[in-house]
Amino acid sequence: MKIPFNRPTRVANEFESMRAAYDSHKIAGDGPCGKEVEKILQQQMQAEKVLLTTSCTHALEIAGILLDLKPGDEVIVPSFTFVTTALAFLMAGAKPVFADIRPDTLNIDEQQLPSIITPRTRAIVVVHYAGVGCEMDAIQSICDRHRLVLIEDNAHGLFGSYRGRPLGSFGSLATQSFHETKNITCGEGGALIINDHAYIERAEIIREKGTDRSRFFRGQVDKYSWIDKGSSYVLSDILAAMLQAQFLVFEEIQSMRRSIWQRYRQQLRDWALQYRIRLPCVPDHCDQAYHMFYLLLPDGRSRDAFISYLEDHAISAVFHYLPLNLSRMGLKLNGDKQPCPVSENVSERLVRLPFYTNMTGEEQARVIQVATGFNPAVHIQAKLFRQE
Ligand SMILES: *Cc1c(COP(=O)(O)O)cnc(C)c1O
């Protein structure tokens, strides 16, 4: 039996919850399940307002529209992230500017920010990589000093915290993902977290196809009409029902993921030390979100050999991200003016092990047993030999 890289989180009551939503004949967006999930998230984040969306990408698009960007405006994003952290702001008219990452946490390098801020910079988007907080004290003070909007792409960081404060509560805006690979999932879904009151009214309008339909449903206007830009960004209540079933037991989900993460760290430590393989770095002032377990191999050849070795033993491991500054679109936007050496180096060496909420003890034991049988010197040779 092959061990997959990911299996979507599954708790007990998703089907019952979705069935109840269906039976209530309210399956469009903003139904009772959606409201309940928004309430849980709002309490968790101590947010002003939470709006469920069709994806994290769409929540980022709403954030982009809210910034009212003018041609030539720049938005700083890390180079080492998923495409849509940058794409959403490009769609809203900005030029993404790529920042390199720190070699320890693989988060945006806050020390580099002052040198890439220009008079056209409008916002900084941070990603809490693997659910470990970016250096928010420094980043927040840079944003204050330069009057920049701080946005958190918190797709990895749900339930993590930085100096005791929830990730997703620092930015004026933050976004969540409920894609099938994330800790809590409904297949495809997301949320916009609003921490600055001034954005609430317009965000509701943008999310409701540019109309003031939300105010109409609250009885604040007697008809609704077209007010602003927007699109169809509201999550169906069937999907919100699936999320609700998982949010009601989020502490159990997190505790299952914590155990799996800690077992990997404990049982891979000696082997990693022996072969100069680096385990994830979690600073003391960060409570991580247990989103993934990654390793940094000494170089690209050993990383590729490790992935094929695991594949030969029926274990799926994957790598990500290709640095955005080197992507075809990134080069078109920035030329080669902006090298991000750490991001480029890490991208060749990183591997993510199978890691999912419902991973069994036997599955994990097999991954650990196989992984610790890997010896870069021996297996790089074996791979070369086979290719000849
Ligand atoms: C998963 C992810 C996204 C995209 O989320 P969707 O809900 O699939 O749009 C964006 N940013 C990061 C960092 C992610 O990991």
Image (tube, rainbow, N blue to C red):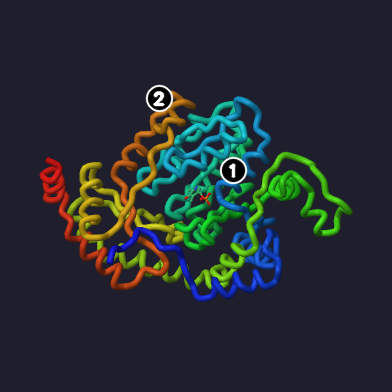
Front residue (pair 185, 371): 185
Discs 2, 1 touching: Cβ within 8 Å: no
Ligand 1 within 8 A of label 2's CB? no
Q: Can you say whether 64 is above or below 37 in the image?
A: above
Q: Residues within 10 Å of mark 2 (few under 14, many from 20)?
A: few
Identify the residue at image location x=26%, y=69%: 365
Q: Position of residue 66 (x, y in %)?
A: 67, 41
Give the answer, above or below, for where 237 lies relative to 82. Answer: below
Apparent side of residue 128 relative to residue 106 in the rendered image (left or right): right
Inspect this view and state whether residue 182 appears: yes
Instruction: Please state, as top left, top right, bottom left or bottom right, where the N terminus lies in the image.
Output: bottom left
Q: Give coordinates of residue 330: x percent, y percent.
A: 45, 31
| Dot label at residue 336 | 2
Between circles 2 and 1, the one closer to the viewer is 2
Q: Is residue 75 above or below residue 154?
A: above
Could you say whether the residue bearing mark 1 is in a helix, strand or loop? Answer: strand
Left or right: 340 as drawn, with respect to 196:
left
* Residue at image point 39% right, 29% down: 339
* Label number found at residue 150: 1
Q: Is residue 199 visible?
A: no
Q: Which residue occupies the foreground of this view, 37 or 20?
A: 20
Q: Earlier in the sequence, mark 2 or mark 1?
A: 1
Q: Amino acid at mark 2?
A: Asp
Front-most of residues 165 and 234? 234
